[in-house]
Image: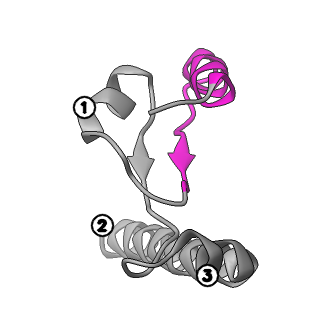
Amino acid sequence: MSGKSTIGLSKLAEKYNKPVIVLPGSVDCPFELYSKSGVTSVFSVVDMASPLERCLIEAERLLYETAKSLVNLIIFIENKKLYQKKDL
């Protein structure tokens, strides 16, 4: 894991009890290293083993698709919570 901004953001998020979700091009180290830095979740943007050139050309699409998938997951979890509260 590299990037001072990720670590700085994680520290700020921890202060406000907020999750940190990282969307790197690829995950290049064990999740434990991210977790120790305060990162909640990590999702690689690259959808398959690809040359760097392809990743750079398709970066916007790759990021969009990963973020869309993540948002769908969050919506699903929030809706499930909402339905569970209604059943009580």
Q: Amino acid at mark 2?
A: Leu
Q: Earlier in the sequence, mark 1 or mark 3?
A: 1
> Left of 84 or right of it: where is 67?
right
Q: Which residues are magenta?
A: 4-24
User: In the rendered image, which quarter is residue 37 located in?
Assistant: top left
SS at circle 2:
loop
Q: Tell me the number on the disc at residue 88.
A: 2
SS at circle 3:
helix
* Residues at marks 3 and 2, CA–CA distance in whole angstroms: 50 Å
Q: Amino acid at mark 1?
A: Glu
Q: Residue at x 59, y 17 (%)?
A: 11
Q: Earlier in the sequence, mark 3 or mark 2?
A: 3
Q: Nearer the viewer, mark 3 or mark 2?
A: 3
Name the residue nearer the viewer: 48 or 18: 48
Q: Amino acid at mark 3?
A: Arg
* Residues at marks 1 and 3, CA–CA distance in whole angstroms: 29 Å
Q: Given contact means CB atoms under 8 Å apart, are the residues at marks 1 and 3 in contact?
A: no
Q: Which residue is mark 1?
A: 32
> Left of 3 or right of it: where is 57?
right
The spot of residue 14 in percent (x, y) is 55, 20
Q: Eyeballing the image, is 32 above or below 65?
A: above
Say few, some or many: other residues with alpha carbon within 10 Å of mark 3 (under 14 / 14 to 19 / 20 or more).
few
User: In the rendered image, which quarter is residue 5 located in?
Assistant: top right
Say few, some or many: other residues with alpha carbon within 10 Å of mark 2 (under 14 / 14 to 19 / 20 or more).
few
Where the N terminus falls, by quadrant? top left
Q: Residue at x 49, y 68 (%)?
A: 74
Q: Nearer the viewer, mark 1 or mark 2?
A: 1
Q: Which residue is mark 3?
A: 54
